[in-house]
Image: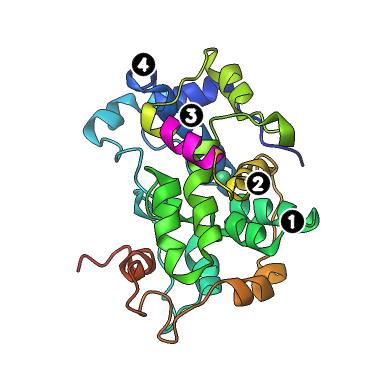
Amino acid sequence: MGEIQVDRKKFLATVGAGALAAMTPEDKAEELEHYMIDVLEGHDHDHGHGPHEVEEDQERPSPPRGTGNLFQPSDRVFEPMPDKPTLVDFFNLRFAPARHVLQSANHALQTGQPEETVMACLLHDVVQNLIKVDHGWWGAQLVEPYVDERVAWAIRYHAALRFYPDESVGYEYPDMYNRIFGEDYIPEPYIERDYQHARAHKWYMDARLVTLNDTYAFQDGMDVSIEPFIDIIGRNFKVPKEGLGYGGTPSSHMWRTIANPNKPL
Ligand SMILES: [Fe+2]
Ligand SMILES: [Fe+2]
C-alpha cells in the first residue's frame, strides 16, 4: 500500500496530446486530479483515449470530460434506492467505493480535526458522481441545505485553494503539478478571485484543511468503511423526513438525479 503513483506518460496518454494542448492550466490540474481519483476508485480509464483505440474512438467520441462518473458510458446496473434514502444509502449504493473522500475524512478523524472538517472531507468530492466541472461550487450547493454553513463553505472554496500552496500547513499541490506538466501554473482570474476571497475569510482554514486532507487521500488499495462516520453524519447532516432528494430543498433534484441516472424525466 502507498500513495497511487501517477505514471506521467500513461496519464498524458489518457488525455491525448491534442486535447492537452488545448487545455488551460486549470483544466490540466483538474484532469490530473480526476485521473488520480478515478484510478483510486478503480474506474475504467481506457475508454476512448488509448492509442490502440483510436479508430473506435473516432466512431464513438468520449463524453465531455466534466461529465460525472454516474453518467459515463458503462454497463453498470444501478441498485434501487430505498424510498426514503439517507446519505449513507447514497454512499453505499451510488458513491461506493468512495475511497478518496473516505480516506480524506479518515485522515481528518485520526488527526483529531474538528467534526465539521471531517464532515466537509467526507462530502468534498462526492458531487463528482454527478458532475466534475466546477466541483467545489456544485459540491457546496449539493449539500448546503443539510449541513452547517461552514461545511458548505469549506467545500466550495477547497476547489480554488487546491491550486495555491500554504507552507504554514505544509500544503504543496502546485509542486505535483509542476512534476507532471513541467510548467508553472497560473490559475484563471475567477479562481484567483475566489482564492483571495477565501484567503482573507475567517473560515479560511476550514477550506484549507480539506485541501490538506486531500493530499493524504490517494492511498492505493486502502478501503475505509463508512461505519466510523455514521454518528458524525447523524449529528452533522440533516436528512429530511421524506428522504434525501424528496425534502423540497434547493438541491433535492440533484440528489434525485444521482439516485436515478437513467430516468430522463
Ligand atoms: Fe476536490
Ligand atoms: Fe479531493
Looking at marks 1 and 3 on the same chain, the residue that comes earlier in the sequence is marked by 3
Q: Quadrant of ligand 2?
A: top right
- Provide the residue designation for mark 3: 29
Q: Is residue 76 visible?
A: no
Looking at marks 2 and 1 on the same chain, the residue that comes earlier in the sequence is marked by 1
- The local secondary structure at tag 1 comes to loop
Of residues 70 and 204, the one nearer the viewer is 204
Magenta segment's dominant SS is helix
Residues under labels 3 and 2: Cα distance? 19 Å
Of residues 151 and 12, the one nearer the viewer is 151
Q: Quadrant of residue 243?
A: bottom left
252 left or right of 98 in image:
left
Q: Residue at x 55, y 68 (%)?
A: 92
Q: Is residue 106 visible?
A: yes
Point out which mark residue 113 bears.
1
| Residues packed near mark 2 inside 10 Å, few (<14), some (14 to 19) or many (20 plus) | many
- The local secondary structure at tag 4 comes to helix
**Residue type beneath disc 4:** Ala
Residue 122 located within the stretch drawn in magenta: no
Looking at marks 4 and 3 on the same chain, the residue that comes earlier in the sequence is marked by 4
Q: Residue at x 70, y 42 (%)?
A: 216
**Residue type beneath disc 2:** Leu
- Provide the residue designation for mark 2: 209
Residues under labels 1 and 4: Cα distance? 40 Å
Q: State which region is magenta.
A: 192-199
- The local secondary structure at tag 3 comes to helix
Residues under labels 4 and 3: Cα distance? 13 Å
